[in-house]
Amino acid sequence: MKLNSSGSPDVAGKPSFEFAAARTPPATGPEAPSGRSRRFRVDVGTIVSAVALAQSLLLVSLGYWGSQRLVSNIGTSAHKANHLRTEDKVLAFLAKAESVVGAIGSAPSLSPVGEHADRTAELLWTLLLQSPELDSVYVANESGQMLMALRYPVPAIRHIAAGPEFTTETWQYKRPLGAELDAQQRFGTRRIESFRSSYNPIARSWFQQARKMQGPIWTSPYVFVAAQELGVTYALPSERRYTESGPNALVVAGDVSLGRLSEFVRLFSGNGYGHSALLSADHKVLARSDMPGVLHQLEPPTGVLGTLHAQMHAHMAAGGTAGRDGNSTFSFDFDGNRYLVQASRIPATGWELVSWVPENMVLGDLRRAVLWGLLLALVFLALALFMSLKLSKLVTSPVENLSLIARRIGLLELDNLPREPSRVLEIQHLDQALDDSARSLKAFSKFVPVDVINQLVAEGHSLAPNGAARRVTVMFTDVEGFTSISESLDIDVLVGMLTEYFNLATGVFARYGGVVDKFIGDGIMVLWGAPADMKDAEYRACLAALQLHAQMGDLNGKWRAKGLPEFRTRIGIHTGVVIAGVLGSNDRLSYTAFGDVINVASRIEGINKQLGTQTLVSEDTFAGLKGRLRTRRIEELVELRGRQTRMVLHELMTP
């Protein structure tokens, strides 16, 4: 059989997509392609969304991580800046005290007694007024003579002369320091008091340490005799030589009370976040901003400062971050809060300045801003993901639909194929290409037996020359008197009648599983059992013959009403083994069957003319009916043209 026209695919018995899929169940067992069924598959939309999500999450994560680091660095830097500012102020405070004492020590006519005592008192008083950092300034010699200007407990000039048995003190009380007076009035004495005491300057620690070190010193905290308050003293040794006496060793000093330091630390800590504290070299609290009042005794750090101090030394002992100047940065937890800490050492005094701030106070707003930024980023990410899904649907949905269309085209289901409109240019091109392919294949399908191709593909046969023995039932049809009919009709009318006849016949054959092998003029060759095996092929072929005669009665009635001649179809059916397969050249193939069974079936159809019958079946076909259809045995053995042996035939009777 050549691959020529088998009529419309809709009436040629072409299996539908579902039917073809149902006939090819997935392979099982060792031969099954398990890798294909288990292979992970994903659509383009998922890939686009996954890539967009991964990139966005990576960027958001990196951004959040970088923001957190930046926030931490900003918070640490801000706290460090505030600590350094406080440290600078402390250093400036101490430097001012050292400067004032140094200025006094460099005065050329400095002396606590004698003719220079009045000028020394004026100098001390003037510098005290200009130095709010200091509580008192004074000078003492090795003879136990001392001259002091003090603001606490009352503004006064204090003269001290230590004798062998007792000390004489003279106090010149001055006007209040805040009064608006001229220079002379501010230094004017309001009253004078003298009394005995046991105070001896040369026995004091500041005097002895300065003489011993022969340089400036800061003392450890002690109780000031005059103010009865804890404080520290900066002392500087100095020496004078006057004409009336020999060398005179002097010590110039200035007092700073711990109350003054506490006010100072509270002042500068209050300008920033958190609190600060000064610790002595032996780890006692000199001043702290988180507790009100003035310290009256030295105590170790307690509370948050105590935990901080313990953590600081543990941190430094463990090799924590510390600069060459003793600066240290760390964090610790106390009472459910986390604190950032900056610590540094004051070189001149050996004190430790520590600052601490709740981390949430410094970083809370920044972290909330970062979290809001993260939330906004996630919202924008969700919107971007939603938009990417919507945009990907513009591609994936049409591509999925086009893949189904392509699958239908592959199965030669070419009727009523939908179009896939899209705004994507490439999809438009693909849709147009598939439509062109479908129209070309639809035109080509008019010339090929589509049902045969589908069955061969569904069964896995290669479209290459091959053949195999099959048991088939073969039907040949012929229109009685077609030559005289064709001579009496115009060509157009004849072609139209043949087209209607063939459409009707092929539709009937397709409903009963027959495959049209070829059209031979007005005749048709039909196979049951090829290319696919078929149970009860004989019965199906006979039912198709009876149905064709029944429907031809209706068609002939229509033609008769139009004044057209009628078609009387003669049919021959035979069953046996044939060679069936794809035959032909490499570039032109045809699925057909050949063998003696084919020839016998053709001869059986032709004997109808002699016997005056319409449908004849062979003995083999009759045996397959198993009495299910009414037949009439032809009593005489029929001699077929080209055969030496006679055959037993049966006429298939209409119900």
Image: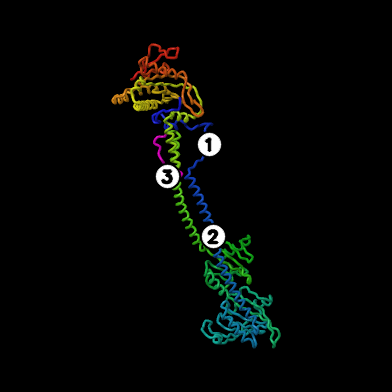
Left or right: 433 as drawn, with respect to 234: left
C-alpha span from label 2 to label 3 = 47 Å
Q: Position of residue 377 (x, y in %)?
A: 48, 55
- Residue topped by disc 2: 70
Q: Is residue 508 above or below residue 268?
A: above
- Sequence order check: which comes first, mark 1 or mark 3? 1
Residue 439 position (above or below residue 530): below
Mark number, residue 422: 3
Q: CA distance from mark 2 to mark 1?
A: 50 Å
- Element type at marker 1? helix
Disc number lying in front (2 or 3) = 3
Q: Amino acid at mark 1?
A: Gly
Q: Amino acid at mark 2?
A: Leu
Instruction: Give the main secondary structure of the magenta stretch.
Output: loop
Q: Which mark is residue 419?
A: none
Question: Which disc is residue 35 wearing?
Answer: 1
Describe the element under mark 3 as helix, strand or loop: loop
